[in-house]
Image (cartoon, grey):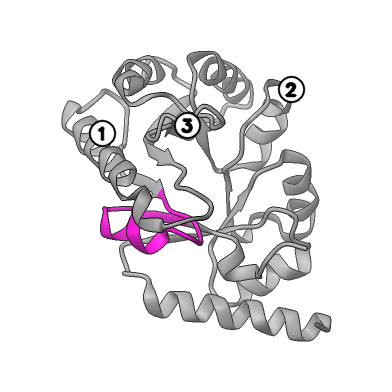
Amino acid sequence: MMMTDSLDYIRQNVRAIWQELPPSVELVAAAKQQTPEKIMAAIEAGVKIIGENYVQEALAAYQIIGQRVSWSFIGHLQKNKIKKAVEIFDIIETVDSIELAEEINRRAAARGKVMPVLLEVNSGREPQKFGVFPEKVEELARSIVQLPGLKLSGLMTMGPAEGDPEAARPYFRLTRQLFDYLQKLNLPGANIHILSMGMTNSYRVAIEEGATRVRLGTRIFGPRQ
């Protein structure tokens, strides 16, 4: 596929997704391994949030694209990348321990920044995935709201990357219940309004279960080479 064709393909995909998404659902273009040109094509078609899994990749794209969009970190954040992540990103979706939260808080405070974060829930209790188990969500949320450099903004969970999307429904539903519960706690300083669930394979089910944000990569950019 020639470059112009592939950029048109991306724009068409984004426009088709906009036709399908309810107005209340935000679209994150999961740009893992995508070139700045391809990311720009998605932005031209209306994408306003770019999701990145790796800080170094994000930095390369950010230097070209800058602040014309919002940047969301959606990968596993290593401690030695936190300083750079706090500089680039507008939200970190994958906080799953108090140690990680404290280091983000320290780096954010040093920049005079309050960093919005989502608490990542391992709702399927999958050993190969990151995230806090459901019964630990309230405890971690209460710890995060004590940190002045962070703004707890909601929850994130991963659905299965392949297989029957219906299999993810109970885990999305559980995460939605936790989200509703956290909202009712009225934790001081928190603003629980983002429920980030669902990827290319499972986003329709995630939306049915209450997602307010979906993270789509293959659906926008096509299969990674």
Q: CA distance from mark 3 to mark 1?
A: 18 Å
Q: Residue 44 appears at what percent x and percent y?
A: 62, 76
Residue at 20% across, 28% down: 186
Between circles 3 and 2, the one closer to the viewer is: 3
Residue at 63% across, 22% down: 107
Nearest the viewer among 185 and 34 is 34
Number of other residues with Cα within 10 Å of mark 2, as a class: few under 14, some 14 to 19, many 20 or more: few
Q: Is residue 121 above or below residue 160?
A: above
Residue beneath label 3, please?
A: 126
From the viewer's perspective, is 176 left or right of 30?
left
* Residue 4 sits inside the magenta stretch: no
Between circles 1 and 2, the one closer to the viewer is: 1
- The amino acid at mark 1 is Leu
Tell me the quadrant of the picture where the N terminus can be found. bottom right
Look at the numbered disc 1 and give the secondary structure of its residue: helix
Q: Residue 115 appears at what percent x and percent y?
A: 51, 32
Nearest the viewer among 177 and 150 is 177
Disc assigned to residue 80: 2
Boundaries of the magenta span: 197-214
Residue beneath label 1, please?
A: 178
The answer to whether marks 1 and 2 mark residues whose Cβ atoms lie closer than 8 Å is no
Residue ranking furthest to the right: 2
Q: CA distance from mark 1 to mark 2?
A: 30 Å
- The amino acid at mark 2 is Asn
